[in-house]
Amino acid sequence: MKYFLYARKSSESEDRQVASIESQISELQHLATRENLHIIDTFSEAKSAKDPGRKEFNKMLEKIRQGEVQGIICWKLDRLARNPIDGGQIAWMLQQGLIQHIRTHERSHYPTDNVLMMSVEFGMANQFIRDLSVNVKRGLKTKAEKGQYPGPAPLGYMNTPMSNKGEREIVKDPERYDLVRKMFDVMLEGKLTPPEILKIATDKWGLTNARGGEFARSSIYRLFGDSFYYGTFEYPKGGGSWYPGTHEPMITEDEYDRIQVLLGRRSQPRSKKHQFAYRGPILCGECGAMVTAEHKRKIQKNGNIHEYIYYHCTKQKKVKCSQRSIEAKELKQQIENILARIEIPHEFYEWAMDILRERNKEEFEAKERGLAGVRRRYDSCINKLDKLIDMRASGEISEEEFLRSKLVTVEERVKLQELLNDSDGEIGQWVDKADAIFNFASTARKTFIEGPDEQRGAILNALGSNPTLKDGKLFIQLEEPLVFVEAASQEAKRVTGIFEPIESGLDRELLREKYSKSPILLRGSDSNRQPTR
């Protein structure tokens, strides 16, 4: 029986752990010698098997169909095929007897074997490549969301060497950065065409690409139209998702715009700076990873363009996470619903603050009376220290008596000073905090609805701690004072609704009287005061 030896090495990452072509050939030749297998020719190629169309592989199969050989020697079945089309050809030719023997370094395959085992092995190879593709795309997308361009650095930049794969960043290329910036400067003058600028850069400035060769003439227009140079990039290309890069921009956005006008590209797709109001504070309720935001553009057949923002788990934890994305509009509505639960009428806010200021006045007067005694004791300590110094100077007391009395008096003075300092800082603080809380509850919902994204993000942060998103629902633990405000909100709205519309001073007086008779509102104002002190 005659055999073809087939060796394949892919240049892609999934095959880097596999022996090189030379190693495969050497090992398989030893195997053929040991088992007395007659090799008449060797086929080898450095090409991925994830898609059909390998030149050497197809040439080998054609020769087998012509009856030149009856067997194949290869390292593993996945060297022959990683896609269902090529795998199906091999399995069918084996069943038909065109191939009578396939020998790998692990085992032999014959026409009489159960074809199911070979199908499973080919299927596993195909699934591996599909899973790998999904994982790679997800990793590249995550990298883009972090602001790191997922690809080779453009001319003028370089990927950091000596870094682990996936952790490489893009930095300035010390040899080419200034030259490329100089090319942009000449382009901004508007006197030369891009090919003329490239010729000057190549012939006079010594510009080369990263491999040391000449920069392609066909790439110069792409360079001047690359948004990467002003700090943003689209990934994937044509996908409509734009990300701000973490690299240092070479030009400004205004300079980029002027260059596009010079190139006649006024309608060229541009990145849009999207404000992701809620990215950062929210965590995934399933795996605990951060929730990020992503902009997507959908183009309908009629040419209409719809743009959306979605929030979803970054899935950066090692555990598998099943959470799906949620549209920004839905998330905004959920936050608005939470704000509605703590919203209080402005009339209640004014009444509550009047009550709290009156109580603060009473507390201030009571504390002042208490502090008067503390101040007298403090002044007494100072006088006592002065007398001790005089007595020691006149020899009335010994050094030992002086030090012992001084130590006791100084300790008492320090304690009294701390009491004075703490009380001075405490008086009135809780009123200011309560004012901020009630004002927030009174205005936050309206500000959230009408304000810019920056304010919406700040309002979400102020609501409470540990916001989580799970199954499309936002969960947030309200700050402790807001818990009491939430309890009073419904009652305050109910009471206020009785008098609406409030048109006169008499209505306001009656409303305040009604507030004062509500045990829920009085209890809420008392409770709200305590945690803020």
Image (cartoon, grey):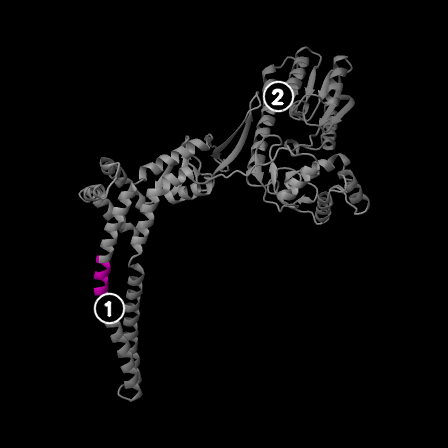
Of residues 437 and 515, the one nearer the viewer is 515
Q: Does residue 383 sit above or below 280 in this rendering?
A: below
Q: Which residue is mark 1?
A: 374
Picture coordinates of residue 176, whole percent (x, y): 72, 47
**Tag 2, which secondary structure?**
helix
Disc 1 or disc 2, which is closer to the eye? 1
Point out the stretch of residues depicted in magenta.
Answer: 362-370
Of residues 4 and 198, the one nearer the viewer is 198
- In the picture, measured across the screen, residue 250 lies left or right of residue 196, that is left
Q: Amino acid at mark 2?
A: Phe
Label 1 and label 2: CA atoms lie apart by 88 Å
Q: Is residue 366 magenta?
A: yes
Residue 69 visible from this viewpoint: no
- In the picture, measured across the screen, residue 214 lies left or right of residue 158, that is right
Q: Does residue 196 sit above or below 28 in this rendering?
A: below
Q: Quadrant of the N terminus?
A: top right
Mark 1–mark 2 contact, CB under 8 Å?
no
Picture coordinates of residue 515, whole percent (x, y): 21, 43
Q: Amino acid at mark 1?
A: Val
Q: Which residue is mark 2?
A: 122
The residue most toward the front is 504
Q: Does residue 495 sit above or below 418 in this rendering?
A: above
Q: Mark 2 or mark 1, which is nearer the start of the sequence?
A: 2
> Of helix, strand and loop, which mostly describes the magenta segment?
helix
**Tag 1, which secondary structure?**
helix
Give the numbered dot on residue 428. Answer: none
Of residues 138 and 164, the one nearer the viewer is 138
